[in-house]
Image (tube, rainbow, N blue to C red):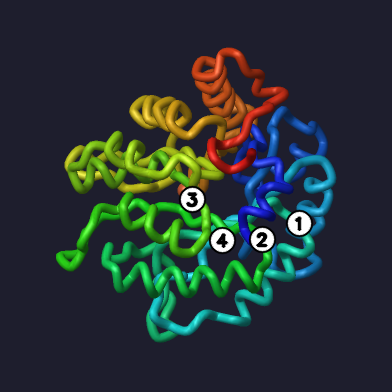
Amino acid sequence: MTLDMLQQTNNFLGFGLGLRTQHFQEVITNQPNIDWFEILSENFMVAGGKPRYYLDRIKERYPIVMHGVSLSIGSTDPLDWNYLKQLKTLINHVDPPWFSDHLCWTSFKQINSHDLLPLPYTDEAIKHLSERIRIVQDFIGKPMLLENVSSYLSFKDSEMTEWEFLNTIRRESGCFILFDVNNIYVSSRNHDFDPMDYINGIDVDSVLQIHLAGHHDFGSHIIDTHDHDVCDSVWELYERTLRRFGPVSTMIERDDNIPELNELISELDQARNIYRNVFSNLSSENPTTKPAGLIE
Ligand SMILES: [Fe+2]
């Protein structure tokens, strides 16, 4: 079902930004050179009001994808059907090509941690997650992407690497991957693994969207803060990611210390330049290829 839906979708959207309140009016007035926006679903779930007013005007001009933080797909709590109904209502309104959340858990016994907490990489967790993902996808009726989260601890019970865990869930559930390159870099430094093992370990037909972001480097560890520019090491990994996965819709997330829109557009141009260098025979203005393996 999911693959059929994707075959009707233009998977490569180009280069986007996370839509933030500070930039609403400028986006509407100046229509800047940004190919698409990602919204945080929870910020637009209430019908009416200013957020929905701006969203409705911006979606007339730009493709929008939706990204959530509250699904808690890895929790052992029952799925939150009130949340899922609100999410589906917003998805029907926005009509994004896909929606996403995180491969994590955020709540336990209805207590919300407001954090994206990592999972043990076990067969038991794969079974639990895959069942819940299939239920959510069937209910929503759109392709679902799950994002790899950055982590600061690991579980003694883990039986495999994170990338093996992610691949298996993707195969078992039919979901796709939102590949956060910064999160891989952060986790690789915190857990001392080679980020290229992660990039090379993920199935090439599974990545539909890429996140880039900045972090805070404390030397001994890194915190995923989204309050800095993308660092050189993450740009290098982004290039390697494109070489492995082909053209993938890419966006920059900035959630704190948010600069002027022009500054983010300049940063986005750096992603466009890397894309052009990697696919020198293609134009990012008129992309013609899709992520490998998705579209015949
Ligand atoms: Fe992300």
From the viewer's side, name the closer residue of 181 and 18: 181
Q: Which amino acid type is shown beneath numbered disc 4? A: Gly
Please identify the quadrant where the C terminus is shown: top right
Q: Which amino acid type is shown beneath numbered disc 2? A: Lys
Give the CA distance from mark 4 to mark 3: 14 Å
Which of discs 4 and 1 lies nearer the camera? The answer is 1
Residue that badge 3 annotates: 177
**Horizontal side of residue 103 vs 264, given as left or right:** left
- SS type, badge 2: loop
Mark 4 surroundings: few (<14), some (14-19) or many (≥20) residues within 10 A: some
Which callout, 3 or 2, points at the residue further toward the start of the chain?
2
Give the CA distance from mark 3 to mark 2: 14 Å
Give the CA distance from mark 3 to mark 1: 19 Å
- SS type, badge 4: loop
Q: Are the residues at dot 4 and dot 2 in contact (C-beta closer than 8 Å)?
A: no
Tag shown at residue 95: 1
Q: Is mark 2 within 8 Å of ligand 1?
A: no
Please identify the quadrant where the N terminus is shown: bottom right
Which of discs 4 and 2 lies nearer the camera? The answer is 2
Residue that badge 4 annotates: 68
Q: Are the residues at dot 1 and dot 2 in contact (C-beta closer than 8 Å)?
A: no
Tag shown at residue 142: 2
Which callout, 3 or 1, points at the residue further toward the start of the chain?
1
Which of discs 3 and 1 lies nearer the camera? The answer is 3
When the figure is inspected, residue 223 is found, relative to residue 231, above or below; the finding is below
